[in-house]
Amino acid sequence: MNILELMKKRYSAKKYNAEKPIPQEKIEALKEILYLTPSSINIQPWKFTFIQNSEIKAKLASVSMHNTDKINQAQLLVVFSVADDLDAFQEIVDTELPEARRNWYNQIKASKPEADLKIWLSQQVYIALGVGLTASIALGLDSTAMEGIESDKYKTILDMSAYKPLFAMAVGYGSEDDFNRIEVTPKSRRLQESVIESI
């Protein structure tokens, strides 16, 4: 199935089949795909936390606002976090990035207030979310993007110090009685000519 057909098929699952496990090779493939996500100047300011442990998943579900049921039902939760401690991230830049990229990042850092730099880093993580959603359907999995999480509580549960959780993605197999399945609720988009301009 080509990418266009996959995107026509993709939907945001609202209810998951809690009994159907995801083959581990698909989870490993999703890890590799997210690892390969592009970012501006290849800065990679992120951490992707894959959670299959049902107890940890339940704790996170309890601080996920209207997403509690989806997280408890889904076989996998991926938490997308951004580098939040800029001193700690600078150590990563200094030790893991080649000189040209390190210099480029340092120039950007010097030219922006800290708040703006953090916004720019966070924007990179949204690229990874788009990759993750597309990769999920390509792997035959359903997914749901979720900004509705209590970030500080996620940070505590996951024992993060240098990173800040921004959002999460539930992954699994949509339930047959999910009201949001394409067959039940057809995909809805604004008119193409109102969002795409050709010059």
Image (cartoon, helix red, strand yellow):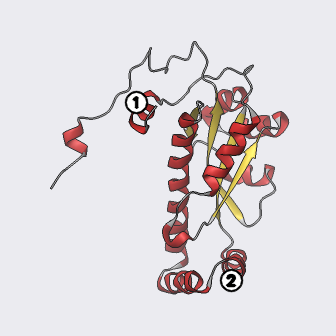
Instruction: Indicate the amino acid at tag 2.
Output: Asp
Residue depicted at 54% across the width and 82% down the height: 109
Front in this rendered view, residue 23 or 50: 23
Q: Is residue 173 above or below residue 176?
A: below
Indicate the quadrant where residue 138 lies: top right
Instruction: Indicate the amino acid at tag 1.
Output: Lys
* Sequence-wise first label, 1 or 2: 1
Residue depicted at 72% across the width and 75% down the height: 88
**Residue 167 rendering spot, x and y as whole percentages:** 60, 48
Q: Residues within 10 Å of mark 2 (few under 14, many from 20)?
A: some
**Residue 107 rendering spot, x and y as whole percentages:** 51, 86
Q: Are marks 1 and 2 in contact (CB under 8 Å)?
A: no
Residue pushed farthest front? 1
Q: Does the image show residue 175?
A: yes
- Residue on which the image places disc 1: 8
Q: In the visual, does 169 lie left or right of 59?
A: left
Question: Which secondary structure, mark 2?
Answer: helix
- Residue on which the image places disc 2: 94
Q: Is residue 115 above or below residue 155?
A: below
Q: How many marks?
A: 2
Q: Which mark is residue 197?
A: none
